[in-house]
Image: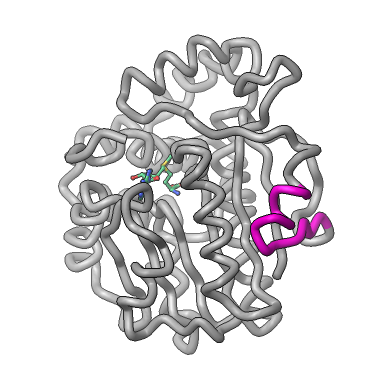
Amino acid sequence: MRDNKPSRTALKVALNIVTLGAKPGMENILPPGIVQASQELLLASGVVGPRTISLAGSRRAVSVYEAFDWMLPGQFEAFAHRKAFFERQVRESIGDGANQVLVLGAGYDTLGWRLAPEYDEVSFFEIDHPATACLKSKGIASMGKRKNLYLIAEDLGKRQLAKVLNDNTSWSQNARTVILAEGLVMYLLPEAVSKLFRQCAEMVSGGSRFAFSYIPTGADGRIDAGRWTGLMLWLQKLVGEPWTWSILPEELGPFLISSGWEMAPELSGKPGRHGVEFYAVAAK
Ligand SMILES: C[S@@+](CC[C@H](N)C(=O)[O-])C[C@H]1O[C@@H](n2cnc3c(N)ncnc32)[C@H](O)[C@@H]1O
């Protein structure tokens, strides 16, 4: 990704959440409080102004997204399902005894900020590229810091995750942990993805889980984002955040085993595509 520019895709996800808040029915899918928190965070971080938030939260914005649904069928609503899926993973894991949450490539996601007061015995860690993480830290400082939420600014393509986490004295390698990588791995190089999964396995105890979304590889060996894959790849490159990793769904199991994890389909719920992505859960 572009070195000193805040992530545009992270901004797009957060604005998308604001727009989904204006679509009737989405309140039954979106986690409670997420729309308000996303609006506040974007404003407090200074990434957008009130006018953009108001436009993003309008019915007109909903119509625009819906008009483009032919290009990436289901992708607009998929962000609501994605947020619900990852939040469910965290709540279930904590219910099963996890006391550490790690959000990789967190962007302007508000899960840690919203859930930290509710689960005050759980430590929440977030890592993102400094260009985005620094803006987010500013926003969180203004919204109200959480004593059990640690924001880490680091480029995961450059620095080893194990070193990053070991530098934080609050991180425990022996804790049952839930790791989230929501809309992240497609932006990393293949070698970085393998390393990330291996290091995650080394940094947590047994009973931990790793929930992630990914874009599959198609039968032709290329990233498969549907009919308009070529255009999407070009657009992602244009914004400086190209998609660089995908995997054949049938190769995911062996890949996870080689990285110290095991597929846990019983934890991931209904299989299938959500917009351009698949969701998966691995267990240790
Ligand atoms: C599509 S956004 C998703 C943000 C968030 N997970 C969400 O779904 O709301 C991808 C995020 O990954 C982060 N990212 C991409 N490459 C990264 C890297 N090498 N190190 C750290 N973060 C990275 C970007 O800064 C961005 O915030």
Residue at 58% across, 43% down: 26
Residue 4 position (above or below residue 172)? above
Could you say where residue 258 lies in the image, as x and y percent from the top left? 70, 55
The residue furthest right is 266
Residue at 61% across, 40% down: 214
Quadrant hosting residue 6: top left
User: What is the magenta range?
Assistant: 253-265
Residue 48: in sight, yes or no? no
Residue at 26% across, 55% down: 133
Q: Is residue 192 left or right of residue 252?
A: left
Residue 279 position (above or below residue 247)? below
Could you say where residue 65 lies in the image, as x and y percent from the top left? 48, 22
Residue 73: in sight, yes or no? yes
Could you say where residue 184 lies in the image, as x and y percent from the top left? 48, 44
Q: Is residue 92 left or right of residue 194?
A: right
Which of these two is toward me, 104 or 139? 104
Identify the image quadrant of the N terminus. Answer: top left
Which of these two is toward me, 123 or 158? 158
Could you say where residue 189 lies in the image, as x and y percent from the top left? 46, 38
Q: In the image, is residue 272 part of the stretch drawn in magenta?
A: no
Identify the image quadrant of the C terminus. Answer: bottom right
- The chosen color scheme is one colour
Q: Is residue 22 left or right of residue 41?
A: right
Quadrant hosting residue 93: bottom right
Residue at 59% across, 56% down: 86
